[in-house]
Amino acid sequence: MNRSRTLRARQRLIDDLPITGELLRGTLVERIVRHKKGCASCARGEGHAVSVLTVSYPGGRKRQVSVRRERADEVRRWLDNYRRLKGAIEAICELNHELLQPARRRRAGRKRRD
């Protein structure tokens, strides 16, 4: 890819960045919780569906946050925004790596193929 095409591709990625405050890192896990005693639903084996946001930190630490059912879709959207932003940043970095490469010179006598 030549320099001008690389710059155009990078600008398209920049223009499409999902810039928003609605970003969230982690994984949303759906679990079934069952009480030991006193719950008819759990006694039938149904249990209760819960959503938990799990976030990993350096040193192997993890944090888990319960997410209310009515906010689960919002959390999924925020997680998706984070993944899209992270992917776009990685693609921009790859294009910048290409821009750092020295320009290739054509050999004399060879025709350019477009």
Image: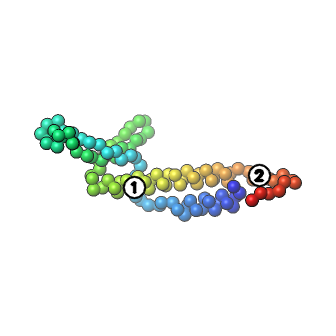
Residue 55 at x, y percent in the picture: 38, 44
**Residue depicted at 31% across the width and 45% down the height:** 30
* 38 vs 98, nearest the viewer: 38
* 38 left or right of 69 in image: left
Residue 81, image quadrant: bottom left
Residue 62, image quadrant: top left
The mark that comes first in sequence, 1 or 2, is 1
Residue 109, image quadrant: bottom right
Q: Which residue is mark 2?
A: 104
Question: Real-space Cα distance between discs 1 and 2?
Answer: 42 Å
> Relative to 66, does residue 9 appear above or below in the rendering?
below
**Residue depicted at 49% across the width and 55% down the height:** 85
**Residue depicted at 87% across the width and 53% down the height:** 108
* 67 left or right of 38 in image: right
Q: Identify the amino acid type marked 2.
A: Arg
Specify the quadrant that holds the C terminus. bottom right
Q: How many marks do you count on the picture?
A: 2
Kindly give the residue lying farthest to the front in the view shown: 44
Residue 78 marker: 1
**Residue depicted at 66% across the width and 58% down the height:** 6
